[in-house]
Image (spheres, rainbow, N blue to C red):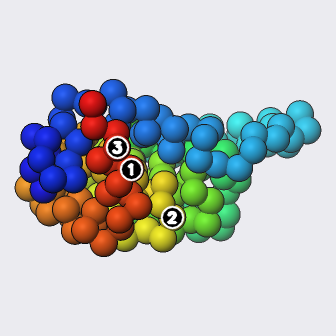
Amino acid sequence: MDFAGTRHGVPWRVVTSAGILLAFVLGTGAGAADVRAPVSTEKAIEQVAKRLIDWLADPSPDAAKALRERVRAGVPPRALLELLDRYRAAPRAEVLDVVKSLTGYRRIDVRARALAAWAATDAKQAELAIAAAARDVVPSIRKLAVALAKQYPSEAAEIVIDELLARDEALAAEVDGAKP
């Protein structure tokens, strides 16, 4: 794929459309309806999210272990979304395994944010996250792979997107239709 504007690629200068897609998939557009829980539940979710974020910020091995164990035990999706947003803003490779484990989460919004957080870790991890997103069964996640490839360009990402668009005709048509 040539991201300069030939074949299936969207020109790199069209970052805005990729940014809009990324915002949609990572924001409220990809998840379930935003139904507010009772105040006591809201506070409990906030407390869980705060604890997860505190562990994420703590560089100690004990904090990483506590974070892993808590996520494995189960965490409300909204708390996971906050954790993934924080990780994406300041990646911490020691807990990348937690982020990667959430790329298989049943909710699309959590999966999408986990993939975006994984990609934010470093260039090699971005390539792996893009490849994982390109293999997802959900079309919006595969579309996220295209947006992530624009955000984290590399030769490996171009190859993955070429292969994705060759096998996903609907996405290829949509990407081609998004060209200016």
* SS under mark 2: loop
Q: Nearer the viewer, residue 176 or 87?
A: 176
| Residues at marks 1 and 2, CA–CA distance in whole angstroms | 15 Å
Number of numbered discs on residues: 3
| Residues at marks 1 and 3, CA–CA distance in whole angstroms | 5 Å
Answer whether labels 3 and 2 touch (C-beta < 8 Å). no
| Disc 1 residue type (three-letter) | Glu
Where is residue 113? Give x, y as percent: 48, 48
Q: Looking at the image, is mark 1 or mark 2 earlier in the sequence?
A: 2
The residue carrying mark 1 is 174
At a point 82% along the width and 41% down the height, the residue shown is: 35
Which of the labelled discs sits on residue 17, or is there none?
A: none
Left or right for 177, reference 126: right
Mark 1: few, some, or many residues within 10 Å (few <14, many ≥20)?
A: few
Q: Quadrant of residue 64?
A: bottom left
| Disc 3 residue type (three-letter) | Gly
* SS under mark 1: helix
Q: Looking at the image, is mark 3 or mark 2 earlier in the sequence?
A: 2
At a point 59% along the width and 47% down the height, the residue shown is: 30
Q: Is residue 118 visible?
A: no
Mark 2: few, some, or many residues within 10 Å (few <14, many ≥20)?
A: few
The residue carrying mark 3 is 177
The residue carrying mark 2 is 138
Where is residue 38? Give x, y as percent: 91, 38
Note whether 74 is above or below 151 in the view shown. below
